[in-house]
Image (tube, rainbow, N blue to C red):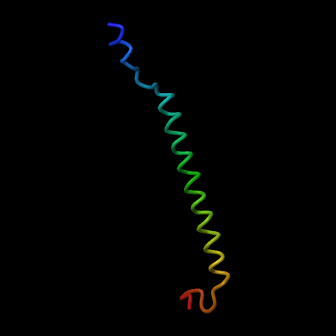
Amino acid sequence: MLLALAGCKQEPSFDERFDAAQKTLEAKAKAIDQELSVAASEGSAVAAGESGSPATGE
């Protein structure tokens, strides 16, 4: 009987689920910010080296 009860686990509370979701979203937001930062720095390096018309890139 004790073994059966030991196997049962309570579901996480609202606060526990909220905290887990918040951590996941914060990690995703940081990753997106980093990607945008890298893309912006690469884009500005490419733009600085371009010659010709900025509209066509020629």
Q: Position of residue 27 (x, y in %)?
A: 56, 47
**At 56% across and 51% down in the image, what residue appears?**
29
In the image, residue 30 sits, relative to residue 38, either above or below, namely above
Q: Position of residue 54 (x, y in %)?
A: 60, 86
**At 51% across and 35% down in the image, what residue appears?**
20
Task: From the viewer's perspective, tell me whether residue 47 is left or right of residue 4.
Answer: right
> Residue 55 lies in what quarter of the image?
bottom right
In the image, residue 46 sits, relative to residue 8, either above or below, namely below
**At 63% across and 90% down in the image, what residue appears?**
51
Q: Outermost residue toward the front? A: 3
Task: From the viewer's perspective, tell me whether residue 28 is left or right of residue 46.
Answer: left
For the N terminus, the quadrant is top left
Count of numbered labels shown in the rendering? 0
Nearest the viewer among 54 and 28 is 28
Q: Position of residue 35 (x, y in %)?
A: 57, 61
For the C terminus, the quadrant is bottom right
Q: Outermost residue toward the right? A: 48
> Residue 48 lies in what quarter of the image?
bottom right
In the image, residue 56 sits, relative to residue 26, either above or below, namely below
